[in-house]
Amino acid sequence: MKTKVCIIGGGPSGLLLSQLLHLKGIDNILLEKHSREYVLSRIRAGVLEHGFAALMREAQCGERMDKEGEIHHGFIISHDGKQDRVDLHMYSGGNSVIVYGQTELTRDLYDARSRMNGAVIHNAEDVQPHDLMSDKPYVTYRAGDEIVRIDCEYIIGADGFHGVSRKSIPKTVLREYEKVYPFGWLGVLSRTKPVSSELIYAKHERGFALCSLRSQVLSRYYIQVPLTDKVEEWTDAAFWDELKRRLSNEVASRLITGPSIEKSIAPLRSFVAEPMRYGNLFLAGDAAHIVPPTGARGLNSAASDIYYLYHAMVDHYLKGDDSGLENYSAKALARVWKAQRFSWWMTMMLHTFPDSLDYDKQLQRIDLAYLFSSEAAQRSLAENYVGLPF
Ligand code: RFL
Ligand code: PHB
């Protein structure tokens, strides 16, 4: 097989790029390790920046998002017995975020690729990129007993944190920065009415909690748990009890509980790999960087990589201008590090750390007190949460 761009990974990053390139007439093939059903069974992000939403519309995939997604103008931080609201709309110059699940967004992208007969190959095993430094790179994969070769001009590594793309960059070239937090988030999805129309981020001495939602009949809740906890050990009843303890009495008394339809523990990690380009391989999304979910940046950072890559590819193929490809890594990383800083700050401010000093606890308290006493601080939070400009 032969194509211009071979994309490894059929998560939101790979699918969005595939769709955008297709609409500009740039031939591409996407290889996904798992089945479509498997990819769509993962419950992940829920908050989209306005810039990401615009990119979904440009990809002709924004219709259902605009119909079913909820526009949120603010969120609540519950702390020290108080409920303070961050007014995103007022402090970001009229912007907001859309609450629309990653699962639904990925479904919309898959549907669009099918509608346009896009080349999406599922269950591609042993995917391997080759000859990255040459101008004739290629990718191989196994379909049953057969090894298939795809010749291409560029390879996009959009295969997530555990993918093969980043690992194919020599260790002498790649620099990795990592911070692992000493806890995870236990998440529950339940077919219940959300406790609040806006997200509640709750700081509590027993640990952080988050009340989020997917729709008015589907709630998503998280609690901070030690890394040693096993998901099987958490019954639904124990989860609801612990969540209630971390919320204000008023919110806890309104919480509607029900059976979990998904329950999982995600460890929290900050990670960046540099550079994001090696020869004709370009990394995008979780393949190159991870943030703890506290600031809702992960999927949104993936989308900004895709924005830069998409424009770079269009400039290359339609205008003969390679500057976007040459500057991709530096440009993407500049924004990635800002998302890292924001996610790290939100995480440090709102979680309970096992070994924290009384001094650290005082700093957390004053961070929140300062935030809600300063318009400038709320403006800074708001501009980061709704998404910095691409
Ligand atoms: P993905 O989604 O991991 O997709 C990568 C795809 O590549 C496939 N793959 C391979 N394919 C071929 N060959 C191989 N060798 C392959 N190896 C892997 C995988 O099967 C997969 O389909 O990466 P992508 O596309 O870069 O998207 C990134 C986002 O998924 C991620 O950043 C977000 O989900 C992070 N995140 C959040 N981000 C936000 O912006 N807002 C949020 O509110 C938010 N909440 C979250 C989150 C992530 C969470 N977890 C579980 C990590 C909440 C949670 C709990
Ligand atoms: C979610 O709804 O899954 C969600 C929302 C906000 C976050 C993280 C996760 O910061």
Image: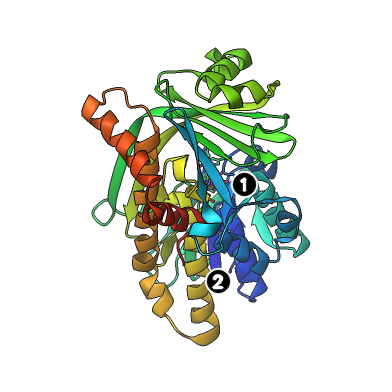
Amino acid beneath label 2: Lys
Residue 252 position, x and y percent, is 60, 23
Q: Residue at x 45, y 66 (%)?
A: 137
Colouring convention used in this rendered image of the protein:
rainbow
Q: Would residue 241 be found to the left or right of residue 328 on screen? A: right
Q: Is mark 1 within 8 Å of ligand 1?
A: yes
Q: Is mark 2 within 8 Å of ligand 1?
A: no
Q: Nearer the viewer, residue 43 or 381?
A: 381
Q: Nearer the viewer, residue 241 or 340?
A: 241
Label 1 or label 2, whichever comes before in sequence order:
2
Q: Which is more foreground, mark 1 or mark 2?
A: 1
Q: Locate residue 109: give its quadrant.
A: bottom right
Q: Is residue 19 visible?
A: yes
Where in the image, quadrant-wise, is ligand 2 located?
Answer: top right
Mark identifier at residue 102: 1
Q: Is residue 276 visible?
A: no
Q: Residue at x 54, y 67 (%)?
A: 5
Residue at mark 2: 4
Residue 320 position, x and y percent, is 48, 86
Q: Dot 1, crowdedness within 10 Å: few (<14), some or many (≥20)?
A: many
Cα separation, mark 1 vs mark 2, equals: 28 Å
Q: Would residue 131 be found to the left or right of residue 185 on screen? A: left
Residue 375 position, x and y percent, is 40, 54
Secondary element at image label 2: loop
Secondary element at image label 1: helix
Q: Would residue 299 be found to the left or right of residue 38 on screen? A: left
Q: Dot 2, crowdedness within 10 Å: few (<14), some or many (≥20)?
A: some
Q: Nearer the viewer, residue 61 or 204?
A: 204
